[in-house]
Image: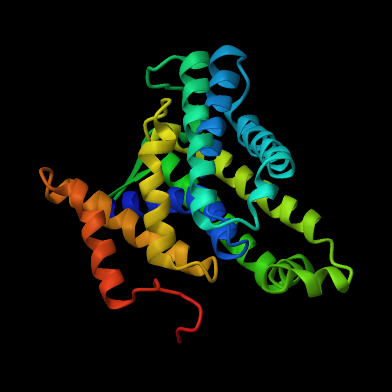
Amino acid sequence: MLTILFDGIAYGMLLFVLACGLSVTLGLMNFVNLAHGAFAMAGGYITVVLINKMGVSFWLCLPVAFVVTALVGAVLERLLYRRLYGKSHLDQVLFSIGIVFMAIAAADWSMGGQQQMTSLPASLTGRWEIGTISIGRYRLFIIVLCAVLAAGLQYILSYTRLGSRLRAAVDDTRTARGLGIGVDRIFTLTFAAGSGLAGLGGALGIELMALDPQFPLTTMIYFLIVVTVGGTSSITGPFIAALLLGVADVAGKYYFPDFGAFVIYAVMIVVLLVRPQGLFARGQK
């Protein structure tokens, strides 16, 4: 039971890193970016190419995946996404879905349709047996890294000048510009950070999630469930939602193999019946 709980927490932490960028763009920037999974896929493929074809260390691949996808996100925000900020959510959805299918086609053409695999460093392979608990080294690494990222993000958004300026830019863009806040620069930086986190999540998730050209579509529902259940008013909501859903998904597939894939949807339905705006929505106490 404790091993299942541990593995579920690790999976939930990974879901959080993959989805937190979408939570920021949707909750704070009010932009529905369904192409978020494409950035995660890009981070995964970058890692695969660097390790399998260039022999780069896994430890170096993680920051590279973050930086490259962040730069791609910044460029796309400047050239494409910015034009959709004032449009309806339907326009944003249609646009980002188009990006998804373009990314799928590009990945299939360049990398092929097969699932990609790579090798982990020896220090991250194997498990520790502590009493009745079996702790996977890689899963423990994911838990520690993602916990640090979650704490850092919450601090930046809640207690730094960048976080306050971002909230001001979202709440009243015109007033923020009048006060001298570089709204465009802040939006670009925020979008790039969200894209970079997705890329980092994609790099971390190669061993736990199937990496193939359909990755943006197969993971899209998980991103949306995390953001929907957790709410979009803070990082705390998606973080708790990701942990809850991760544990529920792993436990459901272990105890109910035939119906385990539906457990995560059942949890979502129950939560939304009780709190339709999510666990931590604006205006809820």
Residue 220, position in %: x, y? Answer: 41, 44
- Name, please, the residue furthest toward the right: 180
Instruction: Look at the image and tell me in which quarter the C terminus lies.
Output: bottom left
From the viewer's perspective, tell me whether residue 22 is left or right of residue 277: right
Q: In the image, is residue 50 above or below residue 134?
A: above
Quadrant in which residue 149 is drawn: bottom right
Q: In the image, is residue 41 above or below residue 134?
A: above
Q: Nearer the viewer, residue 233 or 92?
A: 92
From the viewer's perspective, tell me whether residue 200 is left or right of residue 70: left
Instruction: Identify the residue at image location x=72%, y=42%.
Output: 74
From the viewer's perspective, tell me whether residue 255 is left or right of residue 118: left
Q: Nearer the viewer, residue 96 or 266?
A: 96
Instruction: Identify the residue at image location x=26%, y=51%.
Output: 249
From the viewer's perspective, tell me whether residue 178 is left or right of residue 149: right
Quadrant in which residue 247 is drawn: bottom left
Residue 1 seen in the current view:
no
Residue 271, position in %: x, y? Answer: 29, 70
Residue 136, position in %: x, y? Answer: 37, 42
Q: What's the image's color scheme?
A: rainbow
Count the numbered circles shown.
Answer: 0
Instruction: Look at the image and tell me in which quarter the N terminus lies.
Output: bottom left
Residue 180 seen in the current view:
yes
Q: In the image, is residue 136 above or below residue 87?
A: above
Q: Nearer the viewer, residue 171 or 135?
A: 171
- Name, please, the residue furthest toward the bottom: 285
Instruction: Identify the residue at image location x=26%, y=55%.
Output: 264
Residue 237, position in %: x, y? Answer: 46, 68
